[in-house]
RNA sequence: GGAGGGGUACCCAAGUGGCCAAAGGGGGCAGACUGUAAAUCUGUUGGCUGACGCCUUCGGAGGUUCGAAUCCUCCCCCCUCCA
């Protein structure tokens, strides 16, 4: 336990309602700068009956909200449940600069129309978690776009290059000799200016945003404002169990994934991630998570069953209990009992017969004939349950055939008669 | 402006005239096993071909050579040091 969090333990204890709120907000958080400041803001909020303003920035370029995002969103929801309000800032302006965090690449510049469209898509997904009645949806181009060059220079003068290079990502790239654009320095400053403009009380983000959030704190001070509190949430590893969940890597579970997909992807996370997912993504109470942990340690609980519980919770949250039950049934049927799923897509082909390899390509079960041939040679292809041995075998399509690739891709195909 | 280093397949990275469709790792896919699409192990991973083989690919465009990812010329991009 760090000195800071030890001190926070003390703060939580004796401060009544504000202390209780502080405790609730720190649950699961990776870091909080600083607990003292937050407690003070909470006390004042309660005293004056005025909600705090919490801020979250959103990148407008990738409109799929995934479970990694919901770690922070759920914390914002907790703030709302405690009576506070949320400013959701669509980074339509900062998005054009390009966030250098992590695996950065130059982001495509979006048109006004695309930004609004993406934001609407975002809103639809985000409000599965957030309380729309306590949320403002804002676009930072509305104020950043109006700054004059002189004002931008003034903003930039409030921070030094040395301090910019304190940021791990910048320093590492600089030292490793990888490109580092001057404009990238403006990203944290722009995000900080959002906080100045909105008089933000608390800014949330993943731990990868630590530098940006703290930068906001510093910059607010230089404008003579009360500095924001920074609440960092842990990053959630994706389904590969190693890298942070991200759309571009493809290791993500989206809140709009179908129930079957969401359930299946959840079952594919490594066992080692199970408890973290339960903690950060569900409302399963702490003591129960603790019980599950002990059960698995003692061997009395199969991790698979705990994971099924997690999958059920997640699907229930985003699709409801009926969908969760159906998804679980489908999963058990296909992967545990090795039976067929209920809904198998049907494709019609205007051919009476086809070579196996060509058939797989026609059904989009393989991207090329070479790949199709490999699949067959590796024993990954079944037709009507029987393994196909020869890629060149002829498949009669006079009656409906069931084509299976691997364990989980099924297509029923109907050809032309005769 | 000067000097030097670098751009290789989905990603990282080796390769400096033929044995290179290109080592190794990651990721993906498939198989075995299982407790799940976990873990582990095995195979596979440019396209066309039954196969021999052929075609396209190593920042871009030309050139040398029987033969080029490898050599030469020009161009584009990145980095370092100096100014």
Image (cartoon, rainbow, N blue to C red):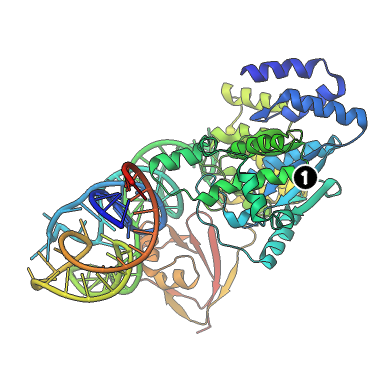
Residue A123 x/y as whole percent:
75, 55
Give me the residue at 60% from left, 48% from top.
Answer: A187
Q: In the image, is residue A361 above or below residue A382?
A: below
Residue A274 x/y as whole percent:
60, 35
Horizontal side, residue A236 vs residue B68: left or right? right
- Residue A207: quarter of image: top right
Q: In the image, is residue B72 above or below residue A194?
A: below
Q: In the image, is residue A199 above or below residue A358?
A: above
- Asked if residue A238 can be seen in this view, the reply is yes
The N terminus of chain A lies in which quarter of the figure? top right
Give me the residue at 71% from left, 64% from top.
Answer: A117
Number of marks in the rendered image: 1
- Residue A148: quarter of image: bottom right
Give me the residue at 38% from left, 69% from top.
Answer: A369
Q: Nearer the viewer, residue A57 or A83?
A: A57
Give me the residue at 53% from left, 53% from top.
Answer: A248
Residue B44 x/y as whole percent:
32, 55
Horizontal side, residue A369 vs residue A299: left or right? left
Residue A314 x/y as whole percent:
69, 44
Horizontal side, residue B55 vs residue A239: left or right? left
Q: Nearer the viewer, residue A333 or A105?
A: A105
Q: Chain of mark 1?
A: A
Q: Nearer the viewer, residue B80 or A282?
A: B80
Q: In the image, is residue A148 above or below residue A46?
A: below
Can you identify the residue that label 1 sits on? A198
- Asked if residue A390 can be seen in this view, the reply is no
């Amino acid at each position: 336990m760090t000195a800071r969090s030890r001190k926070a333990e003390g703060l939580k204890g004796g401060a009544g309602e504000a202390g209780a709120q502080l405790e609730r907000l720190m649950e699961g958080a990776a870091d909080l700068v600083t607990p003292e400041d937050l407690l003070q803001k909470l006390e004042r909020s309660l005293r004056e009956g005025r909600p705090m303003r919490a801020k979250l920035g959103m990148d407008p370029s990738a409109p799929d909200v995934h479970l990694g995002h919901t770690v922070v969103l759920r914390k914002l929801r907790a703030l709302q449940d405690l009576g506070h309000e949320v400013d959701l800032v669509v980074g339509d302006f900062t998005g054009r600069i390009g966030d250098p965090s992590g695996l950065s690449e130059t982001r495509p510049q979006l048109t006004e129309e695309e930004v609004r469209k993406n934001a609407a898509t975002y809103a639809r997904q985000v409000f599965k978690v957030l309380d729309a009645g306590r949320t403002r949806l804002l676009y930072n181009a509305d104020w950043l776009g109006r700054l004059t060059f002189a004002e931008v220079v003034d903003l930039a003068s409030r921070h030094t290059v040395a301090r910019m290079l304190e940021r791990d990502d910048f320093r590492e790239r600089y030292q490793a000799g990888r490109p580092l654009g001057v404009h990238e320095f403006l990203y944290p400053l722009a995000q900080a200016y959002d906080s100045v403009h909105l008089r933000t009380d608390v800014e949330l983000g993943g731990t990868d945003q630590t530098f940006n959030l703290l930068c906001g704190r510093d910059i607010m001070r230089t404008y003579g404002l009360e500095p924001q509190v920074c609440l960092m949430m842990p990053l959630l590893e994706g389904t590969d169990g190693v890298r942070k969940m991200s759309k571009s890597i493809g290791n993500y579970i989206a809140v709009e994934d179908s129930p079957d997909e969401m359930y299946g992807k959840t079952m594919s996370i490594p066992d080692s991630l199970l408890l973290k997912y339960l903690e950060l993504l569900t409302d399963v109470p702490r003591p129960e998570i603790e019980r599950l942990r002990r059960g698995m340690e003692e061997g009395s609980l199969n991790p698979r069953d705990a994971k099924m519980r997690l999958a059920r919770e997640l699907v229930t949250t985003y699709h409801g209990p009926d969908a969760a039950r159906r998804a679980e049934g489908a999963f058990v049927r296909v992967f545990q009992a090795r039976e067929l799923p209920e809904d198998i897509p049907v494709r019609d082909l205007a051919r009476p017969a086809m070579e196996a390899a060509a058939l797989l390509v026609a059904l989009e079960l393989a991207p090329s004939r070479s790949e199709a041939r490999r699949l067959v040679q590796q024993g990954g292809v079944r037709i009507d349950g029987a393994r196909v041995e020869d890629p060149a075998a002829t498949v009669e399509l006079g009656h409906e055939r069931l084509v299976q690739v691997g364990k989980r891709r099924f297509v029923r195909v109907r050809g032309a008669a005769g």
